Amino acid sequence: MSDFTNLIYEFPAVSTKMENIVILTKAYIAYFKERASLENEYGKGIHTQSTVPMKTSLFNKENPVDKTESTLKAMLETINSESEKIGQKHLETASKILNEIVKPLEALVKDIEVGKKKLINDTNKSINSHNALVTAAEKAKVNYKKAVTEHKNAVEAGKTLEGPAQEKNNIKIGQLDAKVKKLEADYRAAVDKANTTREVLYQTELPEVLKGCQELISKHYETFKAVLDQFVVTHIELSTIIADVSQRLRGNMEHVSYEADLEEFIKANLNVHEIKNIELELEEATAPTEEKKEETPVEEEKKEETPIEEEKKEVPTEEEKKEETPVEEQKTE
C-alpha cells in the first residue's frame, strides 16, 4: 500500500496537495449550490406550469382544455399531473443536494483547513528552521575551508623564508592555526546542530505529520466520493421518475382517439339549433296614393247629409233670377 512516508523529503508537494484539495472542495461547494438553485428554479417552473390553469390571454381566463373532448382532454390533464411529479422531484433533488452534498462538503473543508493549518504551518516552520541551520553550516564550512587554505599557504611560504620574514610568517601561521581550530569547531557545531535537527524533523516529526496529512486527504477523498455518489443517486432517482412518467404518458397516448372525440363533439352539438327558410309575409297597402284617393266613410256621410247644397248648384231660370234679385238692384233700373 502506498504511504505518504515515502514522501518524507517531499513535504512541499504534500503541502501543495493539501492546498489543492481545499481549493477543489470550495469550488464544488459553489458548483453544487448553483446546481441546487437550478434544480429548484426548474422544479418551481414545472410546478407552476402544471398547476396553474392555462390562459390564452390576459383578459380571457377560460381554460381551453375545459372545452376539449374527453380523450384528448384526459391526455392533456395527465401531462399536467405527471409533469407535476417531475417538478416535485426536481425540488426534492435541490433539497438533497443542499443537505446531503453541500453541507457535508462545507464541514469537510472546515476540518481540512483546521488540520492543514496546524500540520502544514508548524511543519513548514520546522523545515525553514532546519534549512536555516543547513545554510549556517554551509557558511561555516566556507569560512573553515578558507582559513585552512590560508594556513596551508602560510606554511608553504615559510619554507622559503629566513630571518625576520620567517619569524613574521611563523607568527601568522600561529594566528591562522588558532583561527582554523575555532572555525573548525564552529563548523562542527553547525553541522551537528543541523543534523540533529534533521534527524528529529525527518525521522520523528515529519512521519507523524505526513501520517496526519494522509488521514486528512483520505478523509477528504472518501467524503468527496460519497457526496459524488449521492449526486449520482439523485440523478438515478430523477431519471426513474421521468422514465415512469414517460411510460404512463405513452400508455395514455394510446387512448387518445380522434374518432371518439369527433363523435362526442357531434353528439354534443347535434340538433341544438335549426335554421329554416324565411317565409315571405306581405300586408295590403293602407296608405293613400297620389293617383287615387279613396273617400273615407266620413266624407260619404257628409255627401248624404248635404243634398240641398248640391241642388243649388243647378242653373236657375229667368223667373227665378227675378225673384232672387234684391230690392236694391230693382231701384237702379
Image (cartoon, grey):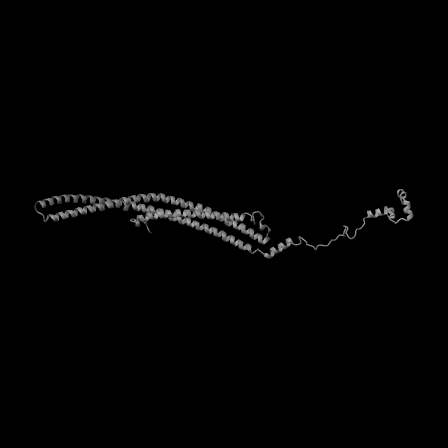
Quadrant of the snapshot with the C terminus? top right
Of residues 283 and 322, the one drawn nearer to the viewer in this rendering: 322
Q: Residue at x 54, y 50 (%)?
A: 80
Q: Indicate left or right for 150 with 307 as reference.
A: left
Residue found at the far bottom of this picture? 259
Q: Indicate left or right for 190 with 236 as reference.
A: left
Whether residue 195 can be seen here: no
Of residues 328 and 217, the one drawn nearer to the viewer in this rendering: 328
Picture coordinates of residue 276, whole percent (x, y): 69, 55
Picture coordinates of residue 5, whole percent (x, y): 31, 49
Q: Quadrant of residue 183?
A: top left
Q: Indicate left or right for 160 with 228 as reference.
A: left
In the rendered view, would you say 139 is above or below 251? Answer: above
Q: Quadrant of residue 323?
A: top right
Of residues 333 and 248, the one drawn nearer to the viewer in this rendering: 333
Q: Residue at x 54, y 52 (%)?
A: 79
Q: Residue at x 24, y 46 (%)?
A: 135
Picture coordinates of residue 41, whole percent (x, y): 48, 47
